[in-house]
Image (cartoon, rainbow, N blue to C red):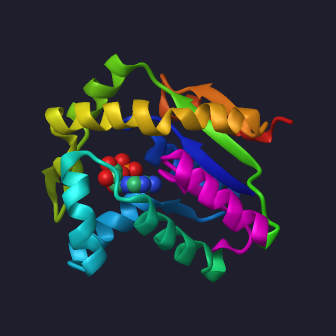
Amino acid sequence: MRIVLLGPPGAGKGTQATILADELGVPQISTGDIFRANVGAGTELGVLAKKYMDAGDLVPDEVTVAMVEDRLAQADAANGYLLDGFPRTVAQAEALATLLDKAGQPLNRVLEIRVPDEHIVERLAARVTIVDGVETQRDDDKPETVRRRLQVYAEQTAPLVDFYSRAGLLRSIDGVGEVTEVTERALTALRSE
Ligand code: AMP
């Protein structure tokens, strides 16, 4: 199954992506994780991406699409994948469609996780990750960056809801609730005709 997960920052996309990928037996491909790994390793791509990420902006489409193209060409993606955080612009969605058309491997589903804005700000403020045993907050989870990321989502990514709805691929679920409840909704939506 080739699936795209859509949703604003803090909707629980990453959490659900990990669980769903495991459940469906496909790799989770998170562009945010790939960028963060590059930032951590100090690669050229990481240095470039960091400027945009710290500002809450999107990394340019050209760079992002080339990176995803490389990742999808790896062996573990041959039988499907769950894309988490890509595409995020209509241009990225169009590039992905062209790529997949050429390979004769169209997307099967796009799952939108819906969460009202007030929940998002709360969730991101509380979000911590453990790095080397220490609780840390992602640089881009600071309140001013979160506001920018939400604005970027509304302006550049939300139009994909319409884009995929017209393509008949979209399924939307409510992302408010316990993790297990949201996973149940997601699996039901993904398995529905
Ligand atoms: P995420 O972990 O998905 O919230 O992504 C963190 C940051 O990585 C975003 O705020 C962007 O700066 C960058 N990023 C991740 N995915 C994309 C994408 N598809 N296009 C452009 N930038 C991205």
61 shown above or below 172? below
Give coordinates of residue 90: x percent, y percent: 55, 46
The residue at the point 21 percent across, 41 percent down is 141
Asked whether residue 91 is drawn in magenta, I would say: yes
Question: Where does the N terminus fall, quadrant-wise?
Answer: bottom right
| Magenta span includes 92 | yes
In the rendered image, the vertical position of residue 145 relative to residue 66, given as above or below = above
Q: Residue at x 64, y 29 (%)?
A: 172
Could you tell me which residue is drawn at 37 percent across and 59 percent down? 60
Is residue 10 found left or right of 187 in the rendered image? left
Q: Residue at x 48, y 22 (%)?
A: 176
Q: Nearer the viewer, residue 158 or 178?
A: 158
Q: Position of residue 87 (x, y in %)?
A: 53, 51
Q: Position of residue 160 (x, y in %)?
A: 58, 38
Compared with residue 66, is residue 14 higher up or lower down, i.e. above or below?
A: above
Q: Nearer the viewer, residue 12 or 52?
A: 52
Q: Work out whether residue 11 can be spotted.
A: no
Residue numbers of the magenta segment? 77-102
Residue 2 position in % (x across, y down)? 71, 57
Residue 110 is left or right of residue 140, and the answer is right
Residue 126, compared with residue 45, is above or below; it is above
Q: Is residue 171 left or right of residue 47?
A: right
Q: Is residue 140 visible?
A: yes
* Residue placed furthest toward the right: 193
